C-alpha cells in the first residue's frame, strides 16, 4: 500500500515551530534535543515554476464523473451481500511480503471505491464478488511502480476484512435535474465550460502550492544542521503512531509484530529522506523566525489561522475554543507560527511562473 497522505505541515514537524522549543513536544522523558541550525545565506530564494500542460478532455470528463459520483444515490449493502465494481467499500487491510509486514500497508476502516488500482493489480478484481463481512486473502505480485522500492516484483498477501459497502447509483449525466443540481449551467456544454474554468483555477492554486514547496526546498537546502538519527526515528515513530499505531493495538499484535511494523517504517529509505527534508524545513523556518525576530501579536494566532480554515477543514468556532483551552492550544499556536513564518519567507522570495508575462 502507498504511504499515508501527508501535508507539508505535518503536526509532528509543526511542533518544532513552538516559540523557544528545545525538544520535540509530546515525547517522554527521553526527549530528543533539537540540534543547532543556521542558514548559510540570507539572500532571497529564487525559484521558477514550470507552465502546466494544456487542459485535456480526459481531465474534464474525470472531473465531471467525480461530481456525478458525489450526487449518486447510495444503498447500504446488507451483511452477506456480494460487492460489485463501482461500490464504495470499507476495509481493514494488513499486507505481508517475505513473511514480514509490508510498511504502510495497515489500514483500518478505510473507505475506497472498488475500481482497479495500478498500484495493486488484482486487488480489486479479487475482492469483487466477496460478501460484506467476509475476510478475504488476496495474493498478488507488487508492480515495478510500487512505492516501496525494495518490494517491487515481490509476491505479497493481503488480509482484508470487508466491513461494509454501499451500492453507488450514478445519475443520468444528461438529465436536466442532475445538471441543475450541479449549479454550473442548464446544459451539458455550459456545465463542461464551467468545469473547465474550475480546473484552470485549481491549477493556478496548485502552481502557488508548487511555488511554495520549491521555495521551502530551497530554504531547507540552506540550513546547516547535523540531524541525529534519533530525531529522525522519533519523527517516524510519531507518524507511524498516527497512521498505524492505534490499529496495531486494536488488532492485538504481539510486541514483536508491533516493533516489526514500526521498524519497517524506520528502515524505508524514502521515508527517512522525506522526514529529514521536512525536519530541515522546520528547523530552517525556526532559524528564519529567530534571525528576523518575527513576532505575533498577542492573540494573533487566530488571525493567521483564519485565512486557512477551509484548507485545513477547520471551523472558526472550534479554532477559537481550542485556542482558549491551554490543553488544546499548543498545536494550533505552532501551526499559526509555521504558517506565519512561511508567509514571511514567501514574501521575500523571487518567484517566476513560466508562461506568464512578467
Image (cartoon, helix red, strand yellow):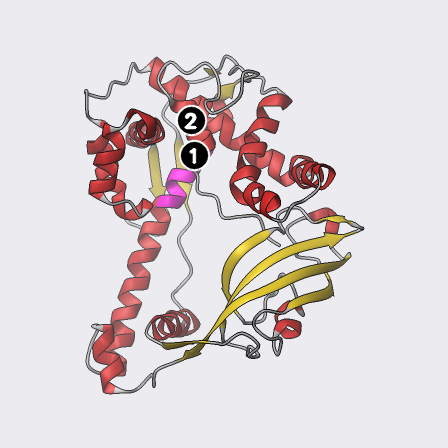
| Mark 2 closeness class: few <14, some 14–19, many ≥20 residues within 10 Å | many
Dominant secondary structure, magenta: helix
Task: Say above or below: 120 vs 280.
Answer: below
- Residue in view at x 58 percent, y 27 percent: 234
Q: At x 58% / y 33%, what residue is drawn?
A: 236
As helix, strand or loop, the secondary structure at mark 2 comes to: helix
Which residue of the protein is positioned furthest toward the right in this rendering?
98
The residue singled out by tag 2 in the image is 15
Residue drawn at the location 74% of the way across and 65% of the way down:
139
Using the rendered image of the protein, determine whether residue 143 is visible from the camera's viewpoint: no
Residue, x 35% and y 17% (percent of image)?
19
Indicate the quadrant containing the N terminus: top left, top right, bottom left or bottom right: bottom right
The residue indicated by pointer 1 is: 11
Q: Quadrant of the C terminus?
A: top left
Which numbered disc covers residue 326? none
Above or below, comparing residue 356 to residue 79 in the picture: above
Name the foreground residue: 229 vs 219: 229
Residue 249 visible: yes
Q: Are marks 1 and 2 in contact (CB under 8 Å)?
A: yes
- Residue 177 percent across, percent down from the top left: 23, 84
Asked if the magenta segment contains residue 313, the reply would be: no
Q: Position of residue 316 (x, y in %)?
A: 21, 42
Kindly indicate the quadrant of the structure image that contains residue 349.
top left
Magenta span contains residue 216: yes
Rendered image quadrant of residue 246:
top right
**Disc 1 to disc 2, how far (Cα)?**
6 Å
Position of residue 216 in the picture relative to residue 125 (left or right): left
Q: On the picture, is 9 further left or further right than 27?
A: left
In the rendered picture of this protein, how many numbered marks are placed on residues?
Answer: 2
Stretch of the chain drawn in magenta: 209-218
Amino acid at each position: 500500500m502507498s504511504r499515508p497522505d501527508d501535508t507539508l505541515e505535518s503536526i509532528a514537524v509543526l511542533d518544532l515551530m513552538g516559540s523557544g522549543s528545545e525538544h520535540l513536544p509530546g515525547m517522554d522523558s527521553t526527549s530528543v534535543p533539537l540540534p543547532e541550525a543556521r542558514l548559510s545565506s540570507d539572500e532571497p530564494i529564487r525559484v521558477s515554476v514550470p507552465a502546466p500542460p494544456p487542459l485535456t478532455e480526459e481531465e474534464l470528463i474525470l472531473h465531471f464523473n467525480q461530481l456525478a459520483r458525489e450526487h449518486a444515490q447510495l444503498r447500504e449493502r446488507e451483511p452477506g451481500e456480494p460487492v460489485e465494481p463501482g461500490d464504495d467499500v470499507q476495509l481493514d487491510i494488513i499486507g505481508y511480503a517475505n513473511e514480514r509486514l509490508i510498511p504502510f500497508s495497515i489500514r483500518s476502516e478505510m473507505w475506497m471505491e472498488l475500481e482497479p488500482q495500478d498500484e495493486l493489480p488484482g486487488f480489486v478484481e479479487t475482492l469483487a464478488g466477496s460478501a460484506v463481512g467476509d475476510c478475504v486473502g488476496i495474493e498478488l505480485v507488487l508492480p515495478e511502480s510500487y512505492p516501496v522500492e525494495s518490494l517491487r516484483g515481490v509476491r505479497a498477501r493481503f488480509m482484508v476484512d470487508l466491513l461494509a459497502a454501499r451500492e453507488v447509483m450514478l445519475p443520468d449525466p444528461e438529465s436536466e435535474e442532475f445538471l441543475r443540481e450541479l449549479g454550473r449551467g442548464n446544459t451539458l456544454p455550459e456545465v463542461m465550460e464551467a468545469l473547465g474554468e474550475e480546473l484552470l483555477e485549481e491549477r493556478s492554486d496548485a502552481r502557488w502550492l508548487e511555488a511554495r514547496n520549491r521555495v521551502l526546498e530551497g530554504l531547507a537546502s540552506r540550513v546547516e544542521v547535523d540531524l541525529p538519527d534519533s530525531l529522525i526515528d522519533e519523527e517516524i515513530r510519531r507518524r507511524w503512531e498516527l497512521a498505524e499505531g492505534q490499529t496495531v493495538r486494536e488488532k492485538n499484535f504481539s510486541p514483536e509484530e508491533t516493533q516489526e511494523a514500526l521498524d519497517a517504517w524506520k528502515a524505508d529509505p524514502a521515508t527517512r529522506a522525506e522526514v529529514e527534508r521536512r525536519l530541515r524545513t522546520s528547523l530552517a523556518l525556526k532559524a528564519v523566525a529567530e534571525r528576523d525576530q518575527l513576532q505575533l501579536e498577542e492573540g494573533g494566532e487566530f488571525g493567521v489561522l483564519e485565512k486557512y480554515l477551509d484548507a485545513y477543514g477547520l471551523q472558526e468556532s472550534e479554532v477559537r475554543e481550542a485556542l482558549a483551552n491551554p490543553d488544546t492550544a499548543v498545536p494550533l499556536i505552532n501551526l499559526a507560527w509555521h504558517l506565519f513564518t512561511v508567509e514571511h519567507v514567501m514574501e521575500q522570495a523571487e518567484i517566476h511562473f513560466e508562461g506568464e508575462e512578467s
